[in-house]
């Protein structure tokens, strides 16, 4: 599984997280719509029973204000709402069927936000954005970041559109544990040492799944990526677009690839940045992701060794030993923090470290956090705040629905990596070889879908999208969360795939500071010309 939250959504509560939120956002990536009738005349036919959805009319209104009929969900995060009001964003609701096998039944409201093209130059259409997750809010990403900071040439020619997939963000979000229960869940030991600790971890996963079932209801069985991809086609149609122009980051690449495979001739210009590989199963995905975080951690160590404030030994072996000893000590005795009710556990420290590996710009914060936690003061406050930001925990103790949606989507998309503790124990040597630091925790985390209330509806498969125009797949050579090999694999699977390589660190490449990457992708989005074969940027 992909590690749950995409750090691009870190709330800004402390100086380090404010800066990291901006950097990680960089790592990810109203004009009236064209008449719907014109678009439908040019596109392939859809099922007649879906006609009411494809033909619906949208009531656009300024984001952050009541909808004309009080039916459209609004961005609830203060930062997103304020940005939407100030930035000229408009919002609407798109209705989609809960169950495509029974489209006359219940419906799901999807939250949509749009930032009109600014000009100069002719409008090219709507460019849909997805920041990843699964569970990341595209609405918040658009209104809180992309609407102002995406490449100027792209903003000039496209209406930027954020659509929260079903069960995510503001689109009937999946609900599971409340704040105090999430605090306990996030602190649960992910490296059990005996039968009692293993049973406690299994109870934690089961309790999470049971809470999702009881609080979310029927929707929990209908939040798969395949269904979300079909929703995107309805959104495309009601926006008045003949083809879907799309930029997806991280999990957003899986959503985009699924759309391309379902509707290849409705694909427009598509960028899949920080690509997932749809052909591999959950266990291999988790194992290769562990290796990806190990690669990123080694890059951090090489940089750390050159810094005066590095709290770890200069050699990799010694640094691994020191960090393992630090985490083992936390397993025995959690550290004090400025939070009067919570202490830093091993699980939260591991999460905080992983969070900082998503981008090299967060490495100074990681050095600081490790120094504070392992120094004479033994203060776990900064590492805890990094873990909180990763899980989108607010200062008031409330969590966003990101983690809930992440589990719900992942557990439907593919059979579980492991069905029980015995299978995890058997796989531990492979995981520890892939990552001496993170392997054990990531192996046990992959047990989270074993007790899910709904069986998986998807299976790993190759995605080819025959007949689609050029699709650009972007891979970063030292990406921690989506290893470079996944981008190479996806580009090879797609009949029209074009691989763009970024030789660098961090998660994803577009809009992160590489002039080569940004120029190549902006040219593609504006003209349709993909990069030449074997293009590598630095």
Image: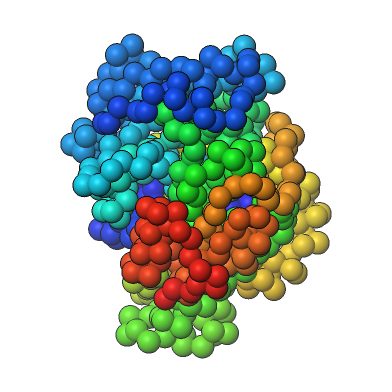
The foreground one among 453 and 186 is 453
Q: Is residue 111 visible?
A: no
Drawn side of residue 386 relative to residue 535, left or right: left
In this picture, is 109 found above or below 448? above
- The x and y percentages for residue 390 are 44, 52
**Residue in the picture at 72% in, 59% down:** 284
Extreme residue toward the left, this view: 86
**Residue in the picture at 62% in, 65% down:** 488
Q: Is residue 126 visible?
A: yes
In this picture, is 54 found above or below 235? above
**Residue in the picture at 76% in, 56% down:** 424
In this picture, is 170 found above or below 340? above
- Quarter of the rendering occupied by the C terminus: bottom left
- The x and y percentages for residue 376 are 36, 74
**Residue in the picture at 52% in, 33% down:** 232
- The x and y percentages for residue 22 are 30, 56
The foreground one among 89 and 444 is 89
């Amino acid at each position: 599984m992909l590690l749950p939250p995409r750090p691009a959504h870190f709330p800004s509560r402390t100086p380090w997280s404010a800066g990291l939120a901006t950097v990680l956002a960089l790592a990810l990536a109203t004009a009236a719509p064209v008449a719907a009738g014109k678009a439908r005349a040019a596109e392939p036919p859809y099922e007649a029973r879906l006609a009411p959805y494809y033909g619906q009319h949208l009531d656009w209104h300024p984001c952050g204000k009541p909808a004309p009929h009080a039916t459209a969900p609004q961005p609830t995060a203060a930062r997103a709402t304020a940005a939407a009001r100030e930035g000229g964003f408009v919002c609407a609701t798109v209705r989609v069927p809960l169950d495509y096998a029974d489209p006359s039944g219940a419906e799901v409201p999807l939250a949509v936000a749009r930032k009109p093209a600014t000009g100069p130059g002719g409008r090219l259409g709507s460019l849909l954005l997805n920041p990843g997750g699964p569970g990341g809010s595209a609405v918040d990403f658009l209104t809180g970041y992309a609407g102002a900071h995406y490449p100027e040439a792209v903003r000039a020619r496209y209406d930027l559109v954020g659509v929260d997939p079903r069960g995510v963000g503001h689109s009937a979000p999946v609900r599971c544990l409340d704040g105090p229960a999430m605090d306990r869940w996030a602190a649960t030991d992910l490296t059990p040492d005996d039968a009692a600790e293993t049973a406690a971890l299994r109870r934690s996963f089961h309790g999470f799944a049971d809470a999702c079932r009881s609080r979310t209801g029927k929707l929990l069985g209908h939040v798969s990526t395949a269904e979300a991809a079909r929703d995107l086609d309805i959104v495309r149609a009601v926006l008045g677009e003949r083809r879907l122009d799309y930029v997806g980051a991280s999990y957003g690449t899986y959503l985009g690839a699924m759309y391309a495979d379902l509707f290849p001739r409705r694909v427009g210009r598509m960028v899949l940045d920080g690509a997932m590989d749809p052909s591999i199963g959950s266990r291999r995905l988790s194992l290769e992701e562990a290796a990806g975080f190990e690669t990123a951690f080694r890059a951090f160590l090489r940089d750390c060794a050159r810094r005066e404030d590095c709290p770890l030994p200069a050699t990799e072996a010694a640094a691994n030993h020191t960090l393992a000893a630090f985490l083992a000590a936390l397993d025995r005795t959690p550290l004090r923090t400025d939070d009067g009710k919570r202490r830093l556990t091993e699980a939260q420290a591991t999460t905080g470290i992983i969070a900082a590996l998503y981008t090299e710009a967060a490495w100074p914060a990681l050095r600081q956090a490790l120094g504070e936690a392992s120094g004479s003061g033994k203060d776990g406050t900064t590492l805890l705040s990094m873990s909180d930001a990763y899980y989108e925990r607010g200062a008031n103790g409330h969590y966003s629905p990101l983690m809930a949606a992440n589990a719900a989507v992942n557990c439907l998309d593919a059979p579980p990596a492991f069905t029980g503790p015995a299978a995890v124990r058997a796989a531990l040597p492979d995981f520890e070889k892939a990552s001496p630091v993170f392997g054990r925790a990531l192996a046990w985390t992959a047990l989270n879908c074993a007790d899910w209330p709904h069986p998986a509806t998807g299976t790993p498969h190759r995605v080819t999208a025959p007949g689609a125009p050029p699709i650009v797949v972007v891979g970063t050579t030292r990406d921690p969360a989506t290893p470079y090999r996944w981008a190479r694999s996806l580009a090879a699977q797609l009949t029209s795939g074009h691989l763009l390589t970024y030789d660098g660190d961090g998660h994803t490449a577009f809009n992160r500071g590489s002039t080569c990457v940004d120029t190549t992708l902006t040219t593609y989005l504006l003209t349709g010309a993909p990069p030449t074969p074997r293009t590598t940027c630095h």
